[in-house]
Image (cartoon, grey):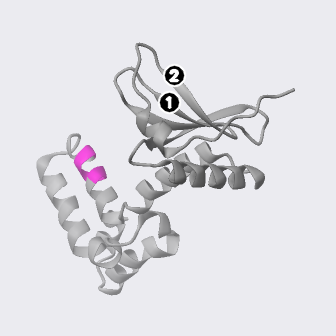
Amino acid sequence: MSRTTVPLSDAACRLAKPTDRAYKLFDGDGLYLLVQPNGRKGWRLRYVKPDGREGLTSFGNYPVIGLADARRKRLEVKRMLADGIDPIESKHQAKAEAVIKGRTFESVALDWHTEMSAKWAPGHSKTVMSRLKTHVFPLIGASAIVDLDTHDLMQPLEAIKKRGTIDVALRVQ
Protein backbone atom coordinates (compact mmCIF):
# COMPACT_ATOMS: atom_id res chain seq x y z
CA MET A 1 0.00 0.00 0.00
CA SER A 2 1.39 3.41 -0.95
CA ARG A 3 1.88 6.23 1.51
CA THR A 4 -0.34 9.26 1.42
CA THR A 5 1.35 12.61 1.75
CA VAL A 6 -0.20 15.34 3.84
CA PRO A 7 -0.08 18.56 1.77
CA LEU A 8 2.23 21.30 2.99
CA SER A 9 1.03 24.52 4.56
CA ASP A 10 2.55 27.97 4.16
CA ALA A 11 3.48 27.87 7.86
CA ALA A 12 5.39 24.60 7.41
CA CYS A 13 7.34 26.12 4.49
CA ARG A 14 8.05 29.30 6.39
CA LEU A 15 9.14 27.53 9.59
CA ALA A 16 11.46 25.04 7.88
CA LYS A 17 14.93 25.60 9.36
CA PRO A 18 18.24 24.57 7.82
CA THR A 19 20.07 21.58 9.27
CA ASP A 20 23.54 20.17 8.69
CA ARG A 21 22.15 18.21 5.69
CA ALA A 22 19.65 19.10 2.96
CA TYR A 23 16.15 17.70 3.44
CA LYS A 24 12.84 17.64 1.60
CA LEU A 25 9.32 18.64 2.60
CA PHE A 26 6.86 16.79 0.36
CA ASP A 27 3.58 18.30 -0.86
CA GLY A 28 2.42 15.37 -2.98
CA ASP A 29 2.26 14.55 -6.72
CA GLY A 30 6.06 14.82 -6.95
CA LEU A 31 6.29 18.39 -5.61
CA TYR A 32 8.62 19.10 -2.69
CA LEU A 33 10.48 21.95 -1.01
CA LEU A 34 14.23 21.31 -0.75
CA VAL A 35 15.79 23.01 2.30
CA GLN A 36 19.56 23.47 1.94
CA PRO A 37 22.05 23.68 4.87
CA ASN A 38 22.74 27.34 3.98
CA GLY A 39 19.05 28.18 4.51
CA ARG A 40 18.06 28.38 0.84
CA LYS A 41 14.72 26.78 -0.02
CA GLY A 42 13.75 25.76 -3.54
CA TRP A 43 10.82 24.00 -5.19
CA ARG A 44 11.44 20.79 -7.13
CA LEU A 45 9.11 18.52 -9.09
CA ARG A 46 9.89 14.90 -9.88
CA TYR A 47 7.89 13.47 -12.80
CA VAL A 48 7.90 10.81 -15.51
CA LYS A 49 8.78 12.07 -19.00
CA PRO A 50 6.70 11.08 -22.07
CA ASP A 51 9.44 8.60 -23.05
CA GLY A 52 9.18 6.83 -19.67
CA ARG A 53 12.34 8.23 -18.08
CA GLU A 54 12.26 10.18 -14.85
CA GLY A 55 12.65 13.97 -14.88
CA LEU A 56 13.29 16.65 -12.29
CA THR A 57 12.62 20.36 -12.67
CA SER A 58 12.92 23.33 -10.33
CA PHE A 59 10.51 26.26 -10.01
CA GLY A 60 12.53 28.76 -8.06
CA ASN A 61 13.15 29.70 -4.49
CA TYR A 62 10.74 30.06 -1.60
CA PRO A 63 9.35 32.65 -0.67
CA VAL A 64 9.73 34.27 -4.13
CA ILE A 65 7.56 31.47 -5.46
CA GLY A 66 5.09 30.57 -2.73
CA LEU A 67 3.26 27.32 -2.16
CA ALA A 68 0.23 28.30 -4.26
CA ASP A 69 2.45 29.31 -7.21
CA ALA A 70 4.41 26.07 -6.95
CA ARG A 71 1.18 24.07 -7.05
CA ARG A 72 0.05 26.03 -10.13
CA LYS A 73 3.37 25.28 -11.84
CA ARG A 74 2.95 21.60 -10.93
CA LEU A 75 -0.44 21.62 -12.69
CA GLU A 76 1.08 23.27 -15.77
CA VAL A 77 3.81 20.62 -15.93
CA LYS A 78 1.24 17.83 -15.52
CA ARG A 79 -0.81 19.31 -18.41
CA MET A 80 2.30 19.48 -20.59
CA LEU A 81 3.11 15.86 -19.78
CA ALA A 82 -0.47 14.83 -20.61
CA ASP A 83 0.02 16.48 -24.03
CA GLY A 84 3.26 14.54 -24.51
CA ILE A 85 5.55 17.55 -24.06
CA ASP A 86 8.74 17.31 -21.98
CA PRO A 87 8.78 20.46 -19.79
CA ILE A 88 12.57 20.70 -19.59
CA GLU A 89 13.00 20.40 -23.37
CA SER A 90 10.22 22.94 -23.84
CA LYS A 91 11.97 25.39 -21.50
CA HIS A 92 15.33 24.97 -23.28
CA GLN A 93 13.69 25.42 -26.68
CA ALA A 94 11.85 28.56 -25.54
CA LYS A 95 15.11 30.08 -24.25
CA ALA A 96 16.93 29.29 -27.48
CA GLU A 97 14.12 30.78 -29.58
CA ALA A 98 14.08 33.93 -27.46
CA VAL A 99 17.81 34.40 -27.99
CA ILE A 100 17.50 33.79 -31.73
CA LYS A 101 14.42 36.00 -32.16
CA GLY A 102 16.15 38.86 -30.38
CA ARG A 103 18.95 38.89 -32.97
CA THR A 104 18.53 41.15 -35.96
CA PHE A 105 20.31 40.84 -39.29
CA GLU A 106 22.39 43.87 -38.42
CA SER A 107 23.60 42.42 -35.09
CA VAL A 108 24.54 39.11 -36.75
CA ALA A 109 26.28 40.93 -39.61
CA LEU A 110 28.23 43.12 -37.17
CA ASP A 111 29.34 40.04 -35.22
CA TRP A 112 30.41 38.38 -38.50
CA HIS A 113 32.30 41.53 -39.55
CA THR A 114 34.13 41.72 -36.21
CA GLU A 115 35.19 38.09 -36.53
CA MET A 116 36.31 38.43 -40.15
CA SER A 117 38.12 41.75 -39.63
CA ALA A 118 40.93 39.91 -37.87
CA LYS A 119 41.65 38.08 -41.14
CA TRP A 120 41.21 41.05 -43.48
CA ALA A 121 43.34 44.05 -44.28
CA PRO A 122 42.11 47.23 -42.51
CA GLY A 123 41.12 48.88 -45.79
CA HIS A 124 39.05 45.91 -46.92
CA SER A 125 37.36 45.70 -43.51
CA LYS A 126 36.38 49.38 -43.76
CA THR A 127 35.04 48.90 -47.31
CA VAL A 128 32.90 45.91 -46.31
CA MET A 129 31.42 47.82 -43.36
CA SER A 130 30.71 50.81 -45.57
CA ARG A 131 28.85 48.64 -48.09
CA LEU A 132 26.82 46.97 -45.36
CA LYS A 133 25.83 50.33 -43.85
CA THR A 134 25.05 51.89 -47.23
CA HIS A 135 23.30 49.10 -49.11
CA VAL A 136 22.15 46.34 -46.76
CA PHE A 137 21.30 47.67 -43.29
CA PRO A 138 18.78 50.28 -44.47
CA LEU A 139 16.69 47.57 -46.17
CA ILE A 140 16.97 44.50 -43.94
CA GLY A 141 19.13 45.47 -40.96
CA ALA A 142 16.28 45.69 -38.44
CA SER A 143 14.68 42.38 -39.49
CA ALA A 144 14.84 39.41 -37.13
CA ILE A 145 17.36 36.91 -38.45
CA VAL A 146 14.93 33.99 -38.10
CA ASP A 147 12.30 35.74 -40.23
CA LEU A 148 14.56 36.31 -43.25
CA ASP A 149 14.50 34.08 -46.29
CA THR A 150 16.33 34.13 -49.64
CA HIS A 151 13.88 36.62 -51.17
CA ASP A 152 14.56 39.12 -48.36
CA LEU A 153 18.32 38.76 -48.78
CA MET A 154 17.99 39.47 -52.50
CA GLN A 155 16.31 42.87 -51.95
CA PRO A 156 19.53 44.84 -51.34
CA LEU A 157 21.17 43.18 -54.35
CA GLU A 158 18.24 44.02 -56.62
CA ALA A 159 18.27 47.64 -55.41
CA ILE A 160 22.00 47.92 -56.16
CA LYS A 161 21.55 46.38 -59.64
CA LYS A 162 18.74 48.86 -60.43
CA ARG A 163 21.23 51.67 -59.82
CA GLY A 164 23.49 50.08 -62.41
CA THR A 165 26.39 49.12 -60.15
CA ILE A 166 26.51 45.39 -60.84
CA ASP A 167 30.10 45.15 -59.62
CA VAL A 168 29.09 46.45 -56.17
CA ALA A 169 26.11 44.04 -56.12
CA LEU A 170 28.43 41.10 -56.73
CA ARG A 171 30.76 42.21 -53.95
CA VAL A 172 27.89 42.76 -51.50
CA GLN A 173 26.53 39.34 -52.35
Q: Position of residue 151 (x, y in %)?
A: 50, 75
Query: For the point 51% across and 48% down, which residue is it?
Result: 67
Residue farthest to the top, as pictured: 20
Q: Amino acid at mark 1?
A: Leu
Which residue appears at 32% of the width and 72% of the height?
142
Question: In the visual, does 170 lie left or right of 121?
Answer: right
Find numbered disc 1 in the image and state the secondary structure of the residue it sits on: strand
Residue 98 horizontal side relative to residue 30, left or right = left
The magenta span reads 111-115
Outermost residue, right side: 1
The image quadrant where one finds the C terminus is bottom left
Mark 1 lies on residue = 34
Q: Which residue is mark 2?
A: 23
Residue 124: x %, y % from top left: 18, 53
Image quadrant in which you'd find residue 139: bottom left
- Nearest the viewer among 171 and 96 is 96
Q: Is residue 156 left or right of residue 82?
A: left
Q: Earlier in the sequence, mark 1 or mark 2?
A: 2
Q: Are marks 1 and 2 in contact (CB under 8 Å)?
A: yes
